[in-house]
Image (cartoon, grey):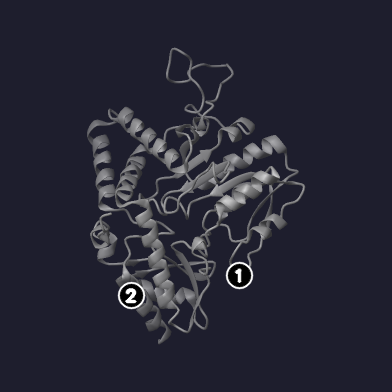
Amino acid sequence: MARINWEKIRSKFAVTRELAYFQSAGMSPIPRVVYKTLRESYKKIYQYGDMNWPADLEESKQLGHRLGTMLGASPEDVIFMPNTSMAFSVVGLSLKNTWGQNFNLVTMADEFPASNVPFEYQGIRMKYVQPLEKRYPLELIAGQIDENTRGIVCSFVQYGTGYRHQLQAIGKLAREKGLLFIVNATQGFPIFPIDVKGMHIDVLSASLHKWGCAAHVGAMFYTSENYRRRFPAPLAGWLSVMPPPDDFIPTQKGEVFNPFSSAMQFNSGTINLQSLLGLKASFEFMEKTGWQNIRQRVLLLASETIRLLKQIPQVEILSPHEYPEEQSGIISINLKDHDNQQCVEFLEARKVITTIRQKNIRIACNFFNNLQDIIRLKEGIEAFLKK
């Protein structure tokens, strides 16, 4: 296997020329090929209006097929939604339409709001599993399930701590208990692989501006065929229902509309195809590098970051890191006797970009980072502590 030239790949990201960027868990920067693709796709609209719309639509469909393959699913099971909050709002409404409100969903106390707000806003009760030293052993999740529980909702990777759930084990538990398994894969996909069938996942959403390296492109939304049979789409638009035999638009009036049996039933209307073309270019770029290579690079950089930051006595590493299978690119730290927010601001002035989550400093290592970035981070924290 050819050795990966990570510095060459790093050079494709303009952000690396100036910044030590550790904010991919907020939004990844885009590589040059995505910038070029977006610029050219908008230029086509500038020059030709919607003349290329059919071809762009076909490319976006091919991207959906690619994502379905990556998930181990049928291409018919995947569409794009504006974001995970919208996807889960649709799911919550479907569940409520079927079950009323006399049920609950089990979820984690550390969840990002997109995993709980859409359900709670509709009056669905959420039961929160409290972590044990930032981890979620399976027995803690099982302990929250009661006779009214109808599903488990969890992130693949927790946004605050970077804890990576073992989805296969949780999915097996859900299947044994006859529960739905609903996953927010935003902080894990596409860096870490997902097999929706092997993991018994019924519903999955992943907002791809985090690790998709394509800016605000929306969310990939997967639903199983069995889920769609049990919980049909509660909302409809012109692209989610079948047209008459003599038209490609549902022009019928005053008739019963038949939703598509595929995930297209959730596709209410037109979306920004140009952003999807950028996402397609990004995935092609990353696939050429190799998903396993990228994953190993991210975990290597995260481990090196933890190793170096452990050398600073005032730094407390909060993210679980004893078990490799629970690690991700996200590291959460706390400065024991100093203000975390002030440290983030101090680092930003030195062009080292981190952020605050759950009142701690969150660091996200991506495959374009290198050892020099991590050293800049360590030296920046040390300089702040000496102030």
Tell me the residue at 63%/64% (across/down).
131
| Amino acid type of the residue tagged 1 in the rendering | Glu
Q: Nearer the viewer, mark 1 or mark 2?
A: 1
Q: Position of residue 172 (x, y in %)?
A: 62, 48
- 21 in relation to 227, above or below: below
Mark 1 vs 2: CB contact within 8 A: no
Instruction: State whether residue 125 appears in this view.
Output: yes
Q: CA gap, disc 1 to disc 2?
A: 29 Å
Between residues 2 and 7, which one lies in front from this camera angle? 2
Query: Label 1's element?
Result: loop
Q: Residues within 10 Å of mark 1 (few under 14, many from 20)?
A: few
| Amino acid type of the residue tagged 2 in the rendering | Arg
The circle on residue 345 is none
Q: Position of residue 183 (x, y in %)?
A: 56, 48
Query: Label 2's element?
Result: helix
Tell me the residue at 50%/28% (across/down).
240
Q: Is residue 46 shown left or right of residue 194? A: left
Q: Is residue 118 shown left or right of residue 384? A: right
Name the quarter where the N terminus is drawn: bottom left
Instruction: State whether residue 121 appears in this view.
Output: no
> Which residue carries the number 1 mark?
133
Q: Residues within 10 Å of mark 2 (few under 14, many from 20)?
A: some
Q: Is residue 240 shown left or right of residue 234? A: left
Q: Residue furthest right?
A: 147
Between residues 152 and 21, which one lies in front from this camera angle? 152
> How many callouts does the rendering have?
2
Name the quarter where the C terminus is drawn: bottom left
Between residues 210 and 68, which one lies in front from this camera angle? 68
> Which residue carries the number 2 mark?
376
- Earlier along the polypeptide chain: callout 1 or callout 2? 1
Tell me the residue at 47%/34% (across/down).
74
Q: Position of residue 256 (x, y in %)?
A: 59, 18
